[in-house]
Image (spheres, rainbow, N blue to C red):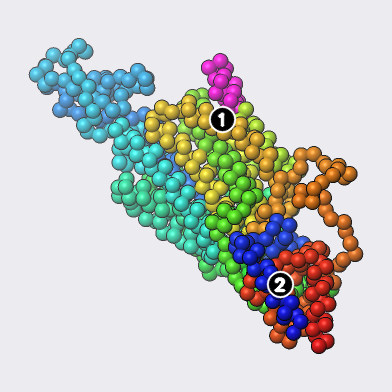
Amino acid sequence: MKSSSHFDKLRSRWKPQLAALPNRLLFPSVRCLTMDFESKIYPQIGGYGRYNRIVTIFSWFPNFAVTLNLFCDVFYTLTPESYHCKPDPSLLPSGFLPSNFSKQAYLNFTIPWDKDSAGLSHCELYRYSSNYTNITDNLPKQRVPCTKGWEYAKPAGLESNFVTEWNLVCGDYWKIPLQHICFMTGWVLGYVLLGTICDWLGRRRALLMSVSLSGLLGVAVCVSNSPVAFLLLRLSQGSMLAGVFLSSYIARLEVCDPRHRLLVSMVSVFFAVFAELLLPGLAVLCSDWPVLQAVATVPLLLMISYWCCPSVFPESPRWLLATGQIPQAKKTLQTFSARNGACRSEELFPGETLLSEIDSAYGEDTDTEYHSVLELRHTRVIWRNGLILGLTLFIGTGIQYCFTRNLHSYSTHFYFSYFLRMLTGALACAFLCLTVDRFGRRGILLLVAIGTGLSSLLLLALTQYLRGGLVLVLSVVGLLSSQALAMLSVFFASEVMPTVIRGGCLGLVMSAGCVGMAASSLMELQNNAGYFLHHVVFASFAVLSILCIMLLPESKRKPLPDSLADGECLRRPPLFLSRVDRDSLPLLRTTRAPTSDYNPDNYARLVSATKKMLAKDTLPFKMAAVTSPHQVLLLPSSNGVISGTQGGARGLERGARQDTSL
């Protein structure tokens, strides 16, 4: 038949070009065969209705549980403000009687005075010759390391923690920052691996797996009996906590419409702030670190109930549609529609319901196709956006150490810096809620990056010339800006990454933030020897990020990209409006093509009817739905995707009509 020979010629003609296309990725101007979720599907299931709000609320609880377990590490590894060696009677002269001295005099006689810390030495004792009976202050003595252990003042909140349990001071002090580095390493691995699992298995399965394993590992941490076991278990639990945070963050974003995305994401930050506010009181009540660990694990164990209640945390319908899981997507959409009170028979196009239109758009034999972050090597815009936002998140988390260290110099009390950092985090979140939807993501990200870099440079250059109050103000402003920079970088990245690889891409971005958090522990591992270099490097990166942010697109109230082609279309908006009468080359054209009287809705119905007619005659080709008024995609059964124009589509219809007449 004519149609068969015609398509055989097309197939042979386009075969080399199709083979060169990586992973069926089309040109940026061509969209994949997906329906516009925000404008076509979302209104038909009730929009951001009652059920969407319920799902959102249950997605906030994982953020509370994760933050509780994350900041417990601060109390576990907190070194007491004062500690000293236990006096060893065997090192004292034979005529020394402790009962003849007061407690302070006894300590002054047995422990050296340290000028640097302005107190008793942390790691040394006096050793006297045993044949002296006349006790005077001028007895010959020498300094020796501690022999009987240490006496600690009460740590903040807890009476015993990881440090006091295993005496990780003096020669073993390096094990404390090492534990924090290993904990952050677990988060990095969790973001990378479980982010990919989110794209392969789905948001719901990734959350349930992460919650279950993190709860079991949390229980195991409670009974750890050595520093090595504690370190390994916390590393493993950190990787699972990263999966809990990532899967709940993405699922929450994908059930919201563009108008509510920012508010819903920022409310989750307030849940984290509430957990951070609650933690010092829990530490005082629990007293011992195993008890605090058990209390922090309880919310994770409670969330295992999500297994039994799939309605409180369903699978993301957007992800199901983007990966071609049409039957599961239709069931999920029916659930959303019913629970939101939307009418199932409400029409997407005149004469067709939502489910039938999904069948028409995706076809009956749509193959399920999963993607991974390895496909970023075939993209130009997506990996660039991810790299820039990963850099800003790395700066926002890593530079906070420079500002909090100045807070310690203003006041050495633990709770002062703890609550001040928590307060600035809440203020940064409120600032983003009030400004980002009004002025755009890119503009506010640029503003907070400038505030972070400027505060850092001023502190770096003028600290020795400024008064303590000005140093405190600059540190607070820098801390607030850096926290806003980190929050907005995560939210911005989740909006510009395509649905099919959103988990893996966002995981890579957030792993960069964990590397920034671990950088402070590297300084402590070297006893803060490289603090000045650390400050210089991050201040330089902050200035560099100001230039990079200008290359980002604007995602303010725009639909989330679903396919790789959609993500490639998110390009930087022009800085200046172009003139209409300005000459432009065809390959660089940015103005929209002139409109025509072409109606895509009517044409979609024509294509659907033609497909059914051709299916009855068993023609050896398949025709796909139109993606725009001037483009059509043809899917030959063996060679992948061919792009054509509107005139080619009309020629196809005429050929089909001639073929059916024969």
As helix, strand or loop, the secondary structure at mark 1 comes to: helix
Assess disc 2: are there few (<14), some (14-19) or many (≥20) residues with their C-alpha within 10 Å of its C-alpha: few
Q: Are marks 1 and 2 in contact (CB under 8 Å)?
A: no
Magenta-highlighted stretch: main secondary structure? helix
Magenta range is: 455-477
Side (left or right) of 512 relative to 493: left
Is residue 161 visible in the rendered image? The answer is no
* Residue identified by numbered label 1: 539
* Residue identified by numbered label 2: 10
Which of the 4 quarters of the picture holds residue 80? top left
Which of the 4 quarters of the picture holds residue 661? bottom right
Q: Of residues 182 and 544, which is closer to you in this image?
A: 544
Q: Tell me how far mark 1 sits from mark 2, CA to CA.
A: 57 Å
Amino acid type, residue under disc 1 in the picture: Ala
Is residue 567 visible in the rendered image? The answer is yes
Going 31% across and 27% down the picture, which residue do you hit?
122
Q: Is residue 33 above or below residue 104?
A: below
- For the N terminus, give its image quadrant: bottom right
Amino acid type, residue under disc 2 in the picture: Leu
Place of residue 492 in the rendered image (x, y in percent of width and height, measured from the top left): 65, 47
Going 54% across and 32% down the picture, which residue do you hit?
538
Side (left or right) of 58 relative to 193: right
Would residue 616 be counted in the magenta stretch? no
